[in-house]
Amino acid sequence: IDLSTRRFKVAGHAIAGFDALRVKNTSTGAWDDKAFASTDLALGEFTIGSADWSDGKEIAVDFRGKAVSGVLMDNAADIVKDLLTVELSEPVANLNSASFTAAKNKLDIGAVFNSSARATLGKIGVFLDKATEGRSVIETINLAVGSYLFSDSSGLFYYRVFEPAVGEGLTELTEKDIYSFAETTDSAEVYSRVTVRYNRRAVQDWAESYVYDIPERQYLHDQPEPALLEKDAVLSATADAQRLGQRLGFQEGRPARRWKLSAPARLLLTKLPGDYLH
């Protein structure tokens, strides 16, 4: 934002921290580590010394995202809520707060020792450097953590994280309640290898990757080479990338089964996405 003082800005909000700074060596093409001359977390800005950078050289920086009271926001429920209410100007009253709180608690692991931060499943790292459709951003987050956002008939937004449920206490449908029931199986796309790219460094065009092979699926479906499914995930931790790769392998590594059900409206109109039937 100011070449004369070599001042750069990475975000339009407070951030949790700067971790690393690299400048591309024009002679070797390698990325050389450099030190920050100064940092301002509240403004999301940093400077670099004149000996380390001159105009025209490519520069890359690792930083931790949006901070609230100095604590990193990385729980998907908090991020989706922030996107809706801050970036998309959705009134807080239009959100079902209980569903967002429940989703946050499902993703929360517990307190980090000797810190005010919380450990979370599916640590999200979304960097928006250009105008992007809000729906697309939220869909990307949902894929990474296995969550979904929807609204009811009154326009109230709900956010949920998928979790298997037992059959006890669920709405039960008997044969007299079901007008028709059909099942189809589609084996057109059965994947036997999943590659998840994560922790991406956009400027350096580099990302870590996790590969999950399912050899028995390859042999079962007579594939000469593994059928590859590739996903770019807004995740920062290896464990989360492994969890996503294995989940996709389980879901996409077998023929897709679809069920179509016709039943009285009085039984179905009271259900929301994610509710279960038995």
Image: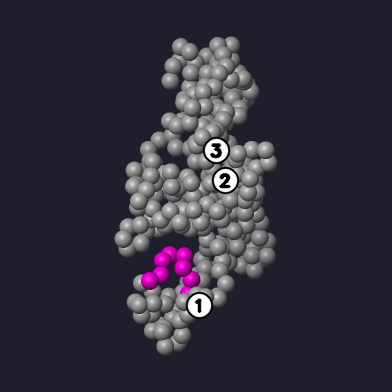
Distance from disc 3 to disc 2, alpha carbons, whole Å, reads 10 Å
Q: Characterize the local packing of mark 1: few (<14), some (14-19) or many (20 or more) Cα atoms within 10 angstroms.
A: few
State the image quarter where residue 111 is shown: top right
Marked residue nearer the N-terminal end (3 or 2): 3
Secondary structure beneath disc 3? strand
Asked whether 250 or 175 is in front, the reply is: 175
Which secondary structure is most common in the magenta stretch? loop
State the image quarter where residue 149 is shown: bottom left
Give the residue furthest to the left: 154
Query: What type is the residue that disc 3 sits on?
Result: Leu
Residue located beneath label 1 in the image: 278
In magenta stretch: residue 13: no
Secondary structure beneath disc 2? loop
Query: What type is the residue that disc 2 sits on?
Result: Lys
Image marks 2 and 1: residues in contact by CB distance under 8 Å: no
Asked whether 236 or 246 is in front, the reply is: 236
Marked residue nearer the N-terminal end (3 or 1): 3
Residue located beneath label 3 in the image: 72
Distance from disc 3 to disc 1, alpha carbons, whole Å, reads 40 Å
Relative to 209, is 149 on the left or the right?
left
Q: Which residues are magenta?
A: 270-277
Residue 123: give its label.
Answer: 2
